[in-house]
């Protein structure tokens, strides 16, 4: 509960700034313990424990950080909190990611499966 409140607070801190949602259609490449991952990650959680690596199939709105075909890794707390099922390598999902731009800095948080992704098997 405390972790959820911390994430909610982090996602709403910049309400007066520029906030929006990014729609990611992406394929799971890997999910590993963060301690076993080497490389660049985008931290999304106050207590990240896993590295979720995705291949971006499409993104709306278009932003430089996530382009079609890019491979991106997010530091997340738990795959069990993100996915309703056991995530499968190679499966494509639709995600919603919150973005805040505050004083010229970009912050991402609150990666979730889109409701659309939950209805349509892929």
Image (cartoon, rainbow, N blue to C red):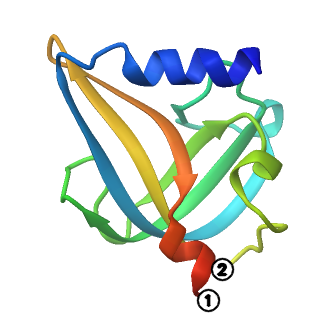
Coordinates of residue 106 in the picture (x, y in percent): 27, 26
In front here: 51 or 47? Answer: 47
Q: Secondary structure at mark 1?
A: loop
Q: Quadrant of the N terminus?
A: top right
In the picture, residue 103 is in which quadrant?
top left
Residue 77, placed above or below residue 66: above
Q: Quadrant of the C terminus?
A: bottom right
Total of numbered circles in the picture? 2
Residue drawn at point x = 55 percent, y = 74 percent: 117
Question: Are the residues tagged 1 and 2 within 8 Å (C-beta)?
Answer: yes
Residue drawn at point x = 28 percent, y = 16 percent: 14
Residue drawn at point x = 66 percent, y = 50 percent: 52
Tag 1 residue: 122
Coordinates of residue 33 in the picture (x, y in percent): 83, 40
Say left or right for 105 vs 31. left
Tag 2 residue: 91
In the picture, residue 47 is in which quadrant?
top right
Say left or right for 47 vs 57. right
Q: Nearer the viewer, mark 1 or mark 2?
A: 1
In front here: 1 or 95? Answer: 1
Q: Secondary structure at mark 2?
A: loop
Coordinates of residue 87 in the picture (x, y in percent): 77, 67
In front here: 99 or 15? Answer: 15
CA–CA distance between discs 1 and 2? 7 Å
Say left or right for 61 vs 94. left
In the picture, residue 96 is in which quadrant?
bottom left
Mark 1: give few (<14), some (14-19) or many (20+) Cα within 10 Å. few
Nearer-N-terminus badge (1/2)? 2
Residue drawn at point x = 32 percent, y = 35 percent: 99
Coordinates of residue 55 in the picture (x, y in percent): 49, 67
Residue 93, placed above or below residue 54: below
């Amino acid at each position: 509960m405390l972790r959820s409140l911390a994430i909610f607070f982090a996602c709403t801190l910049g309400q007066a700034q520029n906030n929006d949602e990014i729609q990611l259609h992406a394929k799971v490449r890997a999910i590993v313990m963060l301690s076993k991952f080497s490389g660049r990650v985008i931290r999304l959680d106050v207590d990240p424990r896993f590295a979720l690596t995705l291949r971006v199939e499409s993104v709306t709105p278009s932003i430089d950080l996530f382009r079609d075909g890019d491979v991106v890794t997010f530091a997340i707390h738990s795959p069990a909190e993100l996915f309703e099922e056991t995530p499968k390598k190679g499966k494509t999902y639709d995600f919603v990611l919150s973005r805040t731009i505050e004083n010229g800095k970009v912050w991402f948080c609150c990666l979730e499966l889109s409701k659309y992704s939950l209805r349509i098997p892929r």
